[in-house]
Image: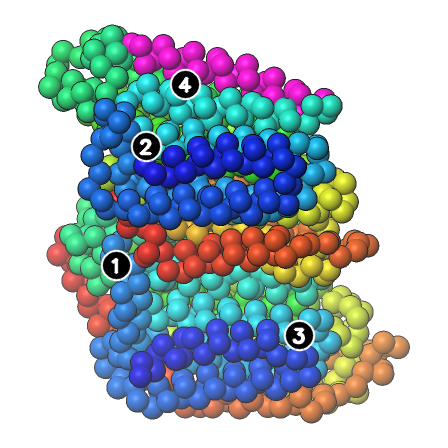
Amino acid sequence: MEILLVQIFIPLIAALIILASGKTFVRGIAGAFSLVSLLITVYLYLNFTPDATTQFLVDLAWIPQFGIHFKAGVDGISMVLLVLTNLLIPIIVLSSFKQDVKDQQAFYALIFFMQSGLLIVFTALDAFLFYVGWEVALIPVYFICALWGGENRIKANLKFFIYTIAGSLLMLIAIIYLHLQTPGNSYDISEFYKLELDSVTQGWIFWAFFLAFAIKMPVFPFHTWQPDTYTEAPTAGTMLLAGIMLKMGIYGVIRWLIPIAPLGFQAWGETALILSVIGVIYASIIAFTQNDIKRLIAYSSIAHVGLISAGIFAWNVQGLQGAMIQMLNHGINVVGIFFIADIIIRRMNTRDLSLMGGIAKPAPMLAIAFLLVLLGTVALPLTNGFVGEFLLLMGIYNYNIWFAAIAGLTIILGAVYMLRMYQKVMFGQVNTNTSVFTDLDGTEKSVLLIISVLIIFIGVYPQPILNISEAAVINLLEQVNQKILVK
Amino acid sequence: MNALITLSVLAILVLYLGLYKAKNALLPVTLLGLGAALVLSILEWNSGAAPIYSGMMLFDNFAVAFTSICIVSTMLILLISKDYFEHISEHVAEYYTIILFALIGILIMVSFHNLSMLFIGIEIMSVSLYILAGIRKHDFKSNEAALKYFLMGAFSTGFLLLGITFLYGASASFDLSTIKEYVISNPRGISPLFYSGVTLMIIGLSFKIGAAPFHFWTPDVYEGSPTLITAFMSTVVKTASFAAFLRLFMVCFAPLHDFWMPSLLVISVLTLFIGNVTALYQHSFKRMLAFSSISHAGYMLFAIVALGPLSGNSVFVYATAYSIASIIAFAVLILVKRQTGSDNFESFNGLARKNPFIAFTLTVTMLSLAGIPLTAGFIGKFMMFSTALSEYHIIMVILAAVNAVIGIFYYLKVIVAMYFKSAERNEVQSSPYFNFVLGFSALITIIIGVYPGFISNFF
C-alpha cells in the first residue's frame, strides 16, 4: 500500500468521520486521528533514508489529457515539514480541548481538511497538485478564522483571503506558462527543473512565484494582512496560520521558486533578501511599540520569518539548513507562545498589556513555561531557536557580512520586545484582575510540557532534524548553482 | 437528430395536455420527454456524423455534447419549477411548451451547418424568450424586461442578418464548408465584404451572449424576468449562444484569426471588467448574478480569442460548470425570496444556522463561480487560462486573474452573509425536488472539480 497516500488522506477521512459523528465523541476522535497521522509520520521517519532521493513516491494519473498526475514524494526537505505538520496538529487539537468551541464537528473537520491540503503542498511533485493543495489549505483556515474569530473577523479575513488568492493566481499563470514550455506538456516538477528559459522570462516567473510565497510568509511589504488576521483569528486558527501555513510559503521558495527560476533568482534574489532583512528590522521595531499581546506576537512572527527567508535567499548550506530547522522551531515556538497568550487573554478578557502585570505570582507554572517558550523564541543557546538562528545568520554572513550584521539585530531586538512583554505580563504590580489568576490546568500543562520538551530537546540535540534534510539541501544547491554558473 | 423531432413532438404534446387540463401530468411528461431526447442525442455520440437535411445541420460530437448539457440544465431547472409557475399564472402548460420551443431553437443553434439554420435557430429561441421574459403580464418590470429584450434582440438580429448577407455576397453560399473553402482557397483575395460580414457577425453574436459593450440589456432583463426564466436564460441560452459562436468561428473564420482576434480580445477584456466591477456594487443577489454572468461571458470568450484545438473543450467545461453553479444559485434565490420577499444579500443572513444543507450547496456554488480548486469552476477557469496562454495572451490572462480576484469579493459576500452574520429567521422551506437539484448539482460541481478527466476530453 502506498503509505504516503494514507498519510495524505487520513486527515480527510478523519474530517468526514467527524462530520458524521455525534457531538460527544468529537474530541476523542479528533485526538485519535491526529495521533494516527503523527504515528504514520513517525513510521515514515523511521523508514526514511537521509539521502538526496525522493522516497515513498506515489504517481497516479489524475487528468492524463492535461499531463496532470497525482505525483507526490518525500525527500529530506519534505520530511521536515511532514514532521512539523503532523507534530503540531495534535498539539493544536489538544490545546483546543479546553476551549468552548461552538459547532465542534465543523471546527475539527476543517482543521483536518486543512491538514490534508498542507500535506499535499509539502509532498507534491506535480505543479497542478501543488496548486490545488495550496488553495485547499486556504479555504478551511478562512472558515476557521471567520467562524470562530473576534469582532472584526470578517473584514480581516476578507483581506487575508483576497491577498492570498491574488498571489496564488499569479502563481497559477506562471505554472500554466511553464507547463506549456515543457517538451511533453507536463506539470512534473522535474520537467520544470529541466527547462532552460531565458533570464528575462525567468525574472517574470520568479516574481509570479515570489509574490504568492511572499504574501503567504509574509515578507515585507506584503505583510499587511497578517497582524489583523492573527489578532482576529481564534487561537487554533492563529496556530495553524503561523505554525504551519506560513511554512507553505517558505517551502515554496525552496522547492519551487529558486530551482525553477535560477536565473530569475540570480537577478532578483538580492532584492528579495533585502526585503526580508528590512522586514526583520521593521517588524521588530513595530513589535516593540505594541500594547496588544497578539499583535506583538504577530509582528514578532514577521521578524522571525523574515530571517528565515533571508537565510534562504542567501542560498548556501548553512542558510538553507538553518531555514529547515528554524521552520520547525518557529512552528513549535509560535504555537507555544500563542497558546500562552490565549491562556492569559481568556483569563483576563483583554489583550492589552498595560492591564496585565504580576501574573507570575499567582501562576508560577505558567511563568516558567512562558519563560521557556520565550527563550526559545529569542534564540538563547541550548534552546531550539538558537540552532536555527545561528545557522541562518551564518548563512547570511557567508553571503554578505553587512546583511548579517543588520539581520543579527533581530536577536537583540527580539530579546528586547519579548522580554518587555514578559515583564509587563508577568512582573510588576499585581492588580485586581491578575490577583485572581489561576494557574495552568491539566490540559494546559500537558500541551506546554510537550512544547517545552521539544524546545529543549532540539536545542540540545538538533542533529536528527539536521540530518534529515542535509543531503537533499546540498543536492538542491548543487543543481541550482550549476545552472547559475553555466550562464 | 432524433432528439430534435422528439422535442418538437413533446412541445405539442404538452400544449395538448394543457388544453385538457392535465396539470399534474405536465412536469412528468416534460421530464420524460427530455430524458428521451437526452438519450437519443447521446446515442449519436461518435456516430461519424455527416451533414444531414441537405447539409443544413451537422450533429457531430460538438453538437451532442452541447445538446446534452443544455437538456440536462433544462431538466434541472424544470425540476425546481414545481409550484413555481402556478404562483405566477393559470396557464402553466404554456411555460413548459415555450421553454421546450426555446430548447428546439437551441438544438438547431448548436448543430447548424448552414448560416440560415443559425439564424432560424437563434430566432426560434429568441422569440420564445421574449414571451417568457414578459410572461407576468401584469408586472411592470416583467413587461419592461420583455420589451427591452425584444428591441435589443431585434436590433442584434438585424446585425446578424446583414452579416450573413455579406458573407453570402462574398462567398456565394450559406453552407459552412463552402464558406470555409472560400476562406482557405483565397488567402489573398478575400473580399472586403467578407470582412464586414465577419465584423457584423461578431456584433450580432456579442449581443446574444451579452458581451460588453453590447450587454446593456442583460441586467434589466435578468432582473425583470421571473427568476426561473432568468436561470434558463443565463445558463442554457448562454451556453447555446457560445456554442453557436464557437462553431461558426472554429469552422469558418479560423484562418482569419488575425483579423478578428484583436476586436474580440478587446470585447472580452471589456466584458470582464464591466461585468465584475459592476457586480461589486450590487445589493441585490439577483442583479449580482446578472452582472457576474456578464463577466463569465468574458472568460468564455477567451476560448474564442485563443482559438485552437482546446477551445471546444474549454467552453464546454466552463459552460457546464457555470450552468450548474448558476442553477444552484437561482434555486436558492427562489427559496430565500419566497421566505423573505427580498433578493438582497441581507436576506441570506444566518442561513447556515437554519439550513446547513442549502447553505453548503450555495457555498460550493460560490466557490465554483469564484474558481477555487476542487470545484468545477476552477477546472473551467484553468482550461480557459491554459487555452489563452497556449496562444501567448499573457497580458489578457493576467487581467483575467485580476478579475478573478474582484469576483471573489462579491461571491464571498454571500458566504459571509450565510455563515458569519446572524439574523432572526425561520428555516427556509424546501421541497424534495429542490433538495435533489441542489444536492445533485453540488455533487456534480465537486466531481468535475476533483476528477475532471471524464468530461474534459470530448473533442
Which is more N-terminal, label 2 or label 4? 2
Residue interval drawn in magenta: B140-166
Residue toward you, B451 or A362:
B451
Q: Which mark is residue A302?
A: none
Which is more N-terminal, label 3 or label 1? 1
For disc 4, the marked residue is B204
Q: Nearer the viewer, mark 4 or mark 2?
A: 2
The CA distance from mark 4 to mark 1 is 38 Å
Given the image, on which type of amino acid does mark 4 rest?
A: Gly
Q: Quadrant of the N terminus of chain B?
A: top left
Residue A320 drawn above or below residue B267: below
Seen as rendered, the residue at the extreme right is A432
Q: Nearer the viewer, mark 1 or mark 3?
A: 1
Question: Mark 4 and mark 3, same subunit?
Answer: no
For disc 3, the marked residue is A104
For disc 1, the marked residue is A64
Q: Which chain contains the residue that carries disc 2?
A: B
